[in-house]
Amino acid sequence: MVGLKRAHYRETRLPMLLLLPQLLVLLLFFFIPAVRALSQAFVITDAFGTSVQFVWFDNFHRLFLSPEYRSAAWITLWFTLVQNILTIVVAGALAFATDRVIRLRGLYRSIVLLPYAIAPVIAGILWAFLFNPSVGPVAHVLKAVGIAWDPNRSGFDAFLLVTLAASWKHICYDYIFLVAALLAVPPSLLEAAAVDGAGPWLRFRRIALPMIGPTVFFLVTMNFVYGFFETFAIIDAVTHGGPGGATMILVYKVYLDGFVHIDLGSSAAQSVLLMIFAIGLTLLQFRYADRRINYDV
Amino acid sequence: MVERARTLDIACHALLILGGLLVCLPIYFAFVVGSHTVSDVLTIPPPWLPGRHFFDNTVTAWQKGNLGRLFLNSLIVAVGITVGKIAVSLLSAFAIAYFRFPWRMTAFWLIFASLMLPVEVRILPTYEAVANVALPLQWLLDALDVGRWFGVEITLDWNMMNSYGGLILPLIASATATFLFRQFFLTVPDELCEAARIDGASPMRFFWSVLLPLSRANMVALGIILFLYGWNQYLWPLLFTTDKSMATAVIGLKNLIPQSDSEPAWNIAMNAALLVMLPPVIVVMALQRWLVKGLVDSGK
């Protein structure tokens, strides 16, 4: 039996009772909604909700042909990719430095951790203010040095702004894991390498990096999950997907098409595609769980 | 440290100071703007140092945003999610790790399948589920045509919009915590359970007197993560609370942000932003060690 304690009880009624609350909540707010999304993806409902027509893959077909959806998919890809690289590189550098310093280590760690407490929407608001063309201090500096900056008009500026805000919010997460992983690298290995004449950088690259490799893999997956699904609030607070769809990520489009444009079939089809993607990411995470055991970190 | 490398150490400190400054920059300017009057905020160049109106603005923000009520809502929702999810997960993890019963593996897979889909991808149908929790029962009744047996039409309606239940329950519906507790239970020595059984303890007695006290550290660590998760929720409260007095603090803050055509009261908005982020920041700062433990454990 998978995951069963060697010392266990043989009863039927009690465990069923214990599982009941979880299964009930899951049924109502997880399984039924997921099945509904699946079924809605294959039908078209008219504007008054009176007639429902089964249309096979029409909703998906429409989606793949729609330039807006394709552009949103590209933007999401770029957004998550840039955010991912920025987050893991900065977090990695900070973790390496934290691992190295002795004095003030606790203080540094507390400060870098701070954004973990801050809601994504607040992170978005803070950055939107800094870069607000009329009142923002950073926007003022940019203007003073002659950089034209207006996230309300330029799609590139808006994209940059949400990417920065999203990374700022998420660096702390990667940082926590990387610091913990670096701490778990056996000192004896590092000392032995140092005795053999390996410098700090060589030790990091040849010993620490391979040992924290699985953690990095895990974090990259988690960064994708974050970028795809949890940045909704940042987009909603900063750009609403604009200007001209330049920051329209897929999750925001599901929301917009479902709740604002009331195109239920399309929104459901988009949900299904995202679900497939989410399942893929979860399976990747399970691979991480396997690899951890091999590396024994 | 293995060897002395002065330049590298200085570079490391410099890097960390730079990182710290970047983290603090937006928060510092929120504080600066939050302590000025509207007209000061609109001057060019914008103010770089804090002004003297911080507490005036706090009072204004508190009243304008109805933050007293919204903070209470946020607290109820965050605590509700924390306590609810931990309780539900502990029980189901106990059942799955410690009992052998028919359908055990089915229950196991049903629960862990929910790990795969984040809330955000099933927004619309979950919204429907909250708008009428009794909907599935209605389908059943319709399918069986129960109404006709009695000659009446049965309409079930249980709307959870604008209620704490609607804000809390859908967010409990994920197995992350169950997974964590199950992992932990698997590391608890088998001898404890055997000893409890020899002493004549019932399964629930073993759960209460042995397993729960052992899980305390995990419960605290997970509790912090869930509290932050609950307090910082955005999408759910945005959709489920049409009644302004049932909104959460984060939603209230969003409504204070100046839109381009209205009066640019950034000072009030940024002051409110600091207020709304204060409770989670205090939690993170005070319980940092536990938070780190919780995160690293839940990533396993």
Image: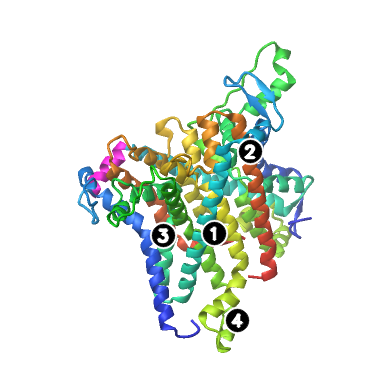
The vertical placement of B144 against A248, above or below, is above
Q: Amino acid at mark 2?
A: Phe
Residue to which mark 2 is pinned: A64
Both marks 3 and 4 on one chain: no
On what subunit does the disc labeled 3 rest?
Answer: B
* Magenta span includes B62: yes
Q: Residues within 10 Å of mark 2 (few under 14, many from 20)?
A: few
User: Is residue A197 shown left or right of residue B113?
Assistant: left
Residue to which mark 1 is pinned: B295
The vertical placement of B202 against A38, above or below, is below
Residue to which mark 4 is pinned: A189
The boundaries of the magenta stretch are B54-64
Q: Which of these two is toward me, B183 or B109?
A: B109
Both marks 4 and 1 on one chain: no
Q: How far separated are the C-alphas under marks 1 and 2?
A: 38 Å
| Circles 4 and 1 in contact, beta carbons < 8 Å | no
Residue to which mark 3 is pinned: B285
Q: How far separated are the C-alphas under marks 1 and 3?
A: 15 Å
